[in-house]
Amino acid sequence: MKRFLLPFVMMLVFSAESIFTDLVHFPFVTDDQVLAPRFLMLVLIFMSAFINQKHAMIYGFIFGFLYDMNYTSLLGVYMFGFAGLCYLASKAFKVLHTNAFVVILIAVLAVCLLEFYVFGIQSLIHKDIMTFNGFVLDRFIPTILLNIAAALILVLPFRLFFMSLKKELRDE
């Protein structure tokens, strides 16, 4: 039964990113700084750690495509970024243990790689988008701090959900 709940949970996480961006404002964040929540990327990495690589890559591909359609003018950036990072994370989880600390570390590293990947693609297309120093100070650092906090909050509930889902998938 939880198998049918997974797409709805992922859609909720997908929607939560834009809702968070619109409704949550921190007093210590200036107008120049950008907080980009990557909750979907975090949950996809959790999925690759606690369920399997195939599910994470499929959901990464689908929701990356939706992400591209909603937020970017170029199709494929997030679609291949999400799926590729899920693949790399699943390979890392085969070598490392999947305890909460390692999963958070890999998830935050995936968010870092995603941010630099998207910045690289955007700077290739739009030459005057943002300087590298501006990117690091105004976007990268606030985004990473936000996503570290989100990973700390989300890892245990999603671990429980994904472990019970994995058990249900194994029983079928």
Image: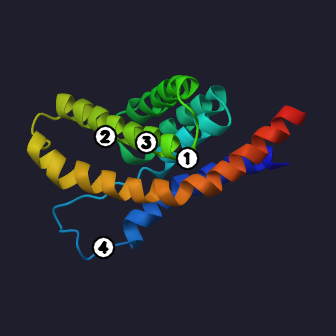
Q: Secondary structure at mark 1?
A: helix
> Against 150, is 101 above or below?
above
Viewer-side label of 4, 3: 3
The disc at residue 115 is: 2
Viewer-side label of 1, 4: 1
Circle nearer the N terminus (1, 4):
4
Neighbor class of circle 3 (other Cα within 10 Å; few <14, some 14-19, many 20+) is few
**Amino acid at the residue labelled 4:** Phe
In the displayed structure image, the side of residue 143 where residue 104 appears, left or right: right
**Amino acid at the residue labelled 1:** Ala
In the displayed structure image, the side of residue 130 where residue 47 appears, left or right: right
User: Which residue is tagged 3?
Assistant: 105
Circle nearer the N terminus (2, 4):
4
User: For the view shown, which residue lies furthest in the bottom direction?
Assistant: 27
Circle nearer the N terminus (2, 1):
1
Image coordinates for residue 79, horizontal then vertical, percent = 46, 32
User: Which residue is tagged 1?
Assistant: 100
Mark 1 and 4 residues: CB-CB less than 8 Å, in contact?
Answer: no
Q: CA distance from mark 3 to mark 1?
A: 9 Å
Q: Residue at x 51, y 61 (%)?
A: 153
Neighbor class of circle 4 (other Cα within 10 Å; few <14, some 14-19, many 20+) is few
Q: Secondary structure at mark 4?
A: loop
- Rendering colour mode: rainbow
